[in-house]
Image (spheres, helix red, strand yellow):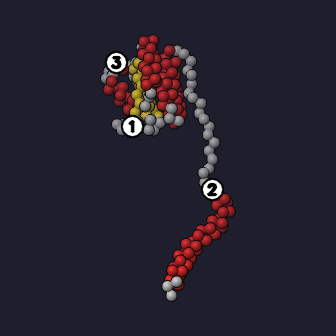
Amino acid sequence: MLNRTTRKSLGDSLKALEAKTGFRLQVATVRKLEVEPDAFALGDKIVEHWYPTVQEGGKKGILLLVTATKDGALTGGPGFLKALGDDLIDSVTGDNLPILAGDEKFNEAVVSSVKRVEAKLTGGADPGPPPRKETARSRTYKTRAETDRTRGATGTIVLTLLGISVVVPMLQYWGYTSSDE
C-alpha cells in the first residue's frame, strides 16, 4: 500500500531510530484482517512470532495499518510500550491512522505516525495528530412537509402518464382496425 519513496524514507528513518535509541519499529500494512479480528491482537501475534522471547522483543515494536477498515495498531514488547506510553499509542491509533487512512492517505498516515513515535523515543516534541476536518452534515432526504407540498403535482403527473399509456394503444388499435372496414 505504500509507494516506493515512502518505503525508502521510512526504511532510512527507522534504521536511524534504531541506531540512535536501540528501539526497533517495523511497519506492516495489510488489506484486511483475516487471521485475527483485532489489529492489536494481530500486531501482538506478529511481534511474538518475530521475537519469541522477551529479551529479543523487549525493545521491538510494530505499526500495523489495516487499509480495508482504515485503522491500525501500535504494539510491541514491554520496553517499547513503556517508552511510548499509553497516551501516544492511543493518539496514534485513535487519531493519526483513522483520520488519514479515512481519507485514504495511507502513506501520510504511516509517515506521521512514525514521526510521532520517533519524536517520543528520541525525547523530541510530539508533532501531534493531524487536525480533524469538521464536515457539515446535511440531510439527503426530503422532510415530510416538502414531500406533502409536491405530492399533489407528482400524483397528477403519474396519473396523466398512466392514462396516456392506456389510451394511446387503444387509439392505435382502433385506428388500425377501423381502416380495414
Q: CA distance from mark 1 to mark 3?
A: 26 Å
Q: Is residue 167 visible?
A: yes
Residue at left offset 52%, top offset 83%? 179
Q: Is residue 177 left or right of residue 154?
A: left
The residue singled out by tag 1 in the image is 33
> Are the residues tagged 1 and 2 within 8 Å (C-beta)?
no
Mark 1 packing: few (<14 Cα in 10 Å), some, or many (20+)? some
The residue singled out by tag 3 in the image is 56
User: In the displayed structure, would residue 110 be above or below residue 145?
Assistant: above
The residue singled out by tag 2 in the image is 142
> Which mark is nearer the camera, 1 or 2?
2
Name the residue nearer the viewer: 93 or 145. 145
Mark 2 packing: few (<14 Cα in 10 Å), some, or many (20+)? few
Amino acid type of the residue tagged 1 in the rendering: Leu
Q: Secondary structure at mark 2?
A: loop
> Which mark is nearer the camera, 3 or 2?
2
